[in-house]
Image: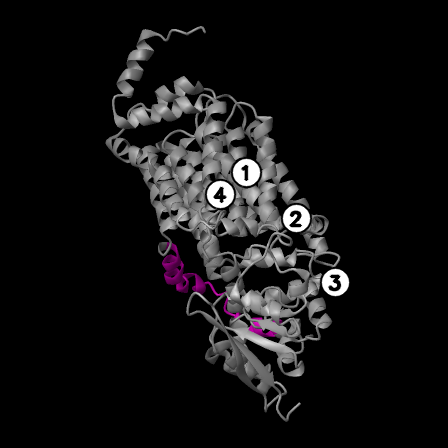
Amino acid sequence: MVHLRKPQGDREALAILENTLYERIAASFDRLAESGGRCLLVSLVVTLVVFGVASCAWVPNGVYDDWSISNALSANWGQDEGLCLFLNALLCRLIFWLNSAFTSVNWFFVVERLSAFAAYLAVVYLSLRHLRFPFSAVTFFAATVLALPGCTYESNFTYVAGMLVGAGGLALLCSLGKDRHAPSLVVAGIVFMAAGALFRWTMFVLSVPLFGIAALFVLFRERNDGMEAGRRLVRLWPFALALVCFAGLYFYNDSAWQEQPWSEWYEFNEARSDIADYTYASYDDVADELSALGVSRNDYRMLKSWITEDPEFFTVEKLEAIRDVVTGQRADVSRLASAVPSFFVDIVSSLRFDGLIVALLAAVLACARGRGRVAALAVMFVALVVCWALFAFGRMPARVFLPAWLFTALAASMLAGMREPAAGFRRTRMASHAAISWPTRLIGPCLAVLPVVAIAFIMAFSVTHIRIDRLEALFAEDSFNPGGYVYDYIESHDDEVFVLDIPSSAVLIYANLMIAPFDADTVNHTSSVGGWAAHAPYATARNVRIDMKSPIRGLVENDRARLLTRGADTADMLLAYLQEHGYPDASCEVVDVIKEPSSSSKMNVYEFSKGTSG
């Protein structure tokens, strides 16, 4: 092996620079970054450990939507195709085909988990390979904060979309930071960003202003290299290609939703979501207008509780009229000010969110210099304003904040910490550690241990919640045999039709580790009072098949129907609704109680009667 001898001056300079703890840590990151193979190996080991352990954990929080999506695309409803409100139609059709062709595997969770695995691996690799310390550690930390638990044991498709788009944007910025575009980075960036748009297109849209600012800064950071502005802008072609791919996916999805009956469901859910998911007005604020529409206080309460599965009353036209009444103030700019308290309460209530902001601010303020610091702070401010405005005008729920801030962490880190393209690793090491201030020496080592602390803490938490049998639940038919008390009760009363509210559906997930969707037999004797799948074509066809065209009215019209709910609130609302809408003498009673053998948890079984009316 040939050893190249460094000049004496370089050795002395490096020895001086590496005297402090900060320089030693930074030099270690630089030496790791010199080898793409070492970076990939470290990233792969970390990803395997994180996802391997966390995927075995079970924490009953945040999985309901993903399980519902899995049900919608399970091919167990007797339909020839399936779409989902949140995913792109191309991804829906791919998963639906996989579930139809290979019925023993829950393909939505397989695709979701593999996508999250690849995105996390890419972010860790790119941060180690292309960012200077401590920004590589901060980006590593940001990815870990979002991957655990959102992309692992909580299985939240919004976090997966954020991770994918963030990985794609980071790859394109890394390519832009080189003297010439690296084909592998361009391909990876476009593929990851497109995959993120397939999972949730709003994540792609949120990334545009943030990565756009970062790209322009990276492009124009060297003013005296002789390159004209026009030639610089031409180098943005990978970002333009990503936008073209996104436009193609968007229009494909839009065309799929133009077809009946999917378009009617889409319009219904748009209105339902606006009313149920955002706080605009109480019933008392708009009582006269709602009464004129035939909407009572109890009707409005049901809407706010996601109970809408009565196509005779909760029609598209009715919900759009209600939305026009209760959201009339959305365009008022004063909503921006009124949303500030709840917006910041949601921010500070998340320790993961707080840790990410503090780490990013510390790195930018202490370790960035010049235009990099200003631009990085500008990106963070733009992200905050965008999230605040979307929240205030009812276009972004609080649960989307944290994934959206992944873009901020990545883009700001790229602005402040990208390695110079022409410098080479040794020259970068010399230049990047020169004139180090005392805040940098103090804060830098603290930032270095953040990823390790985050992984160790959350992995320790995961180990205490490991459930090996949850892995078996990925196989939906032959090997999946849940023993949950509610599920067993439903299966043992197959001559009855059970109507579930949202909490009782959640009990099925939590009690049974039900990552696998309902099988075809269970689908055919269960229904729901609402949720985002209300009025879906596949749910409507199932309801007609089991003589529950209106699951709410079916409680009194179908003698086989029973309501499953934990408390009395849902039963009271449904009874009041039936009495107000055609069955004034309706009544209900608890006919059975399903008890959890190992705890005090229980589920009430209600039977409704129309009485002498109707």
Q: Which residues are magenta?
A: 319-347
Mark 3–mark 4 contact, CB under 8 Å? Answer: no
Q: In terms of secondary structure, what is the magenta stretch mainly?
A: helix
Q: Element type at marker 2? A: helix
The residue labelled by disc 1 is 118
> Which numbered disc flags the more N-terminal residue, 2 or 3?
2
The residue labelled by disc 3 is 260
Which of the labelled discs sits on residue 476, or is there none?
A: none
The residue labelled by disc 2 is 91
Relative depth, front residue between 428 and 447: 447
> Which numbered disc flags the more N-terminal residue, 3 or 4?
4
Label 3 – label 4 distance at C-alpha = 37 Å
Quick one: label 1, few (<14), some, or many (20+) residues within 10 Å?
some
Label 1 – label 3 distance at C-alpha = 36 Å
> Which numbered disc flags the more N-terminal residue, 1 or 3?
1
Say which quadrant the C terminus sits in.
bottom right
Say which amino acid is labelled 1: Ala
Label 1 – label 2 distance at C-alpha = 17 Å
